[in-house]
Image: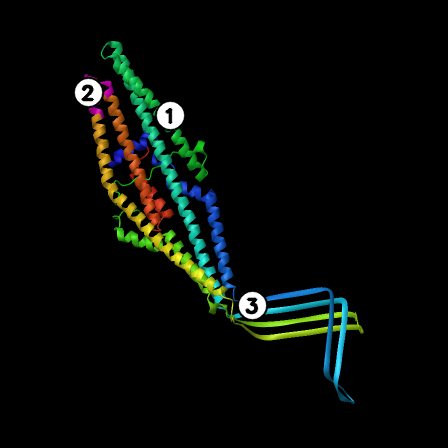
Amino acid sequence: MRKLLLSAALLACGMGAAQAADLHEAWLAARQQHPDMAAAAATRAAGEARRVQASRLWNPSVTAQAAAGAMGSQTSAQGAAFSMPGAPQTSGVGFDTSVRSGPGTRWGVEARMPLYNPERSAQGRQLLLSADLAELQAASVQQQLMLRTAQQYFSAVLAQQQRALLLRQQEATDQALKEAQDRFALGDSPITDVREAEARAQANAALVQAADVEMQIARQALAQTTGWSPAQLPPLHLPASSGNETTALRDGKPLAPLPHWLNLAAQDNLQVRTQAQALALAEQEATKAARFASTKVDLVAQAGGDHLSGSGRWGSASNSARQYMVGVQIQVPLYTGGQLDARQQELLRLQDKAQADLDSARLAVAQQVRTSWLHLQAGAARTQALESALRSAQVRLQATQLGRQVGDRTTLDLLQAHNDAMQSQSNLLGHQTRMAQERLQLMALAGQLDEAALQAATDTAHMLAPPTP
């Protein structure tokens, strides 16, 4: 019976599985052209660049400097001792040199390699964590686009099928109007039947027009996401359920118990993982501000020189100096005026906030998982009820048609029976659409939503869809 119902819904839209564009095809199109995917790719590339930065933090660095310009210098030394070959040493000697605004140059080269630097170690861990966070952010963007594509696809499918049902209802209403007019012309029915049929036909025409607008809006939104031309958008294919919403999302096994989904969400939910990365980043930022983190040990090699020439108070002069050094440099902060302690307290409080945000995200995600799981659990009973209502409406329609032919039912009874049957089928289609979205939402909450999930939904629809007539 479920296959018959689904067959009627698909045939009402004038399409078969082989002719329709499925959800997986819509996602592949959106993935190829939507700007959000370009943004996700750029985010991933930035994350990989941070990994490269982290791997090179401990590499040696070399800097050079040079300067030239007008310089001045004056030196004075008193009480020096002077000696030269062949002459006795002379004490109490003074030396004076002076250059006023002479041309001067200065240069220097320094190579430095860190040996011990807690702040740099924390910075490296931050870069790696930030790279992982970039991957999570890109995955979140992709997942949100996937859900948005699915939602737009389902909306377009539902609008398309609702319009098809209304067109069938309009055909039935027009037929009833024609019969009422013929019966009235033969004197077999009152004019009220004609007026009721006319009113219902006009109302149904208005509903068809409104449904056509809704379908155009839904198809336009899907076209913008997928890049498909709205005018050439193919018929769409509803990823229908198997009639039992408690079936699994991929392999046909029963839906796993709620604790299973809660555990998956706690470990793999993208929002929770993103908040966990934010907490880890806050912890490393607080580590960088700790007092011990400011201690640095570097291997240093330096070379430099100065040259100045010109004339001064005692005549022409030229000064030159060269220096070099290879060794280890240790830097230990002794007192920072309390600024470092205040900075660390700020970062510790931000770390507490990140922990609270993580706890809040876990609670929110757990509640969403429970809601989606319970909706799916209740969906089976709801599906059965809607299928039963549809069967009942179809039987009642057949009985009313027969009663109208023999004169036991009025035209209004027949029109109402047609409306009830259409509404029952519309309710079932809407429920199937909501359950399809609910299944994908649960997988997204558990961190399991991917192309395989969309393909599984499509495969389910192909399995249930009737062959093309």
| Residues rendered magenta in the picture | 397-412
From what the image shows, is residue 391 above or below residue 357?
above
Task: Kindly tell me whether residue 469 is visible in this rendering.
Answer: no
Kind of residue at badge 2: Gly
Quadrant position of the C terminus in the picture: top left
Q: Position of residue 228 (x, y in %)?
A: 45, 37
Q: Which mark is residue 209?
A: 1
Type of amino acid under label 1: Gln
Quadrant where the N terminus is found in the figure = top left
Q: Amino acid at mark 3?
A: Pro
Q: Nearer the viewer, residue 397 or 13?
A: 397
Q: Which residue is mark 3?
A: 60
User: Measured along the vertical axis of the image, is residue 183 above or below residue 393?
Assistant: above
Residue 204 locus on image (x, y percent): 32, 23
Question: Mark 3 or mark 1: which comes first in sequence?
Answer: 3
Q: Which mark is on residue 128?
A: none
Whole-number angstrom distance, CA of label 1 to CA of label 2:
31 Å
Residue 228 lies within the magenta run: no
Residue topped by disc 2: 403
Q: Classify residue 150 as left or right of residue 3.
A: right
CB atoms of marks 3 and 1 within 8 Å? no
At horizontal 37% and vertical 56% (from top left) the residue drawn is: 356
